[in-house]
Image: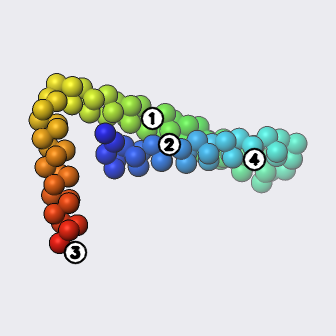
């Protein structure tokens, strides 16, 4: 049972991974380039890349921890979880049927 926050975290992690891969490709493509501006840009990109990798790792860890906590809570309170899911489903059904 994924919440919107967990799905958003997974999507963010996916986008960050793609960004990291693209940045690494750019770093490799410009490895032979010389010049002060290129050197400065590469160093800024390398710093941003490390920051993105760290952020991505934290988001993944947070998502995994939230999923484990959700699983633990559902396993500890299975009937309450079913009741809450049923109630929310009923509420959504009533609201959708009214329109």
Residue beneath disc 2: 13
Badge 4 marks a residue whose secondary structure is: helix
Q: Where, quadrant-wise, is the C terminus in this rendering?
A: bottom left
Q: Residue 45 carries which label?
A: none
Question: Is 49 situated left or right of 80 in this image?
Answer: right
Please state which of residues 7 and 83 is positioned toward the viewer in this rendering.
Answer: 83
Colour scheme: rainbow
Badge 3 marks a residue whose secondary structure is: loop
Evaluate if marks 2 and 1 touch, with contact meaning CB atoms under 8 Å apart.
yes
Residue beneath disc 1: 60
Evaluate if marks 3 and 2 touch, with contact meaning CB atoms under 8 Å apart.
no
Residue 98 x, y percent position in the rendering: 17, 72
**Corner quadrant of residue 50:** top right
Residue beneath disc 4: 26
Q: What residue do we see at 43% from left, 38% from top?
A: 59
Give the CA separation, mark 4 to mark 1. Answer: 24 Å
Residue 34 drawn above or below residue 54:
below
């Amino acid at each position: 049972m994924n919440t919107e926050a967990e799905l958003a975290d997974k999507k963010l992690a996916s986008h960050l991974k793609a960004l990291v891969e693209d940045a690494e490709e750019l770093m490799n493509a410009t490895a032979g380039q010389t010049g002060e501006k290129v050197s400065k840009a590469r160093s800024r990109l390398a710093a941003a890349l490390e920051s993105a990798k760290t952020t991505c790792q934290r988001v993944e860890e947070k998502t995994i921890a939230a999923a484990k906590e959700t699983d633990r809570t559902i396993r500890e309170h299975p009937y309450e979880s079913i009741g809450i899911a049923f109630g929310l489903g009923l509420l959504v059904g009533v609201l959708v049927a009214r329109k």
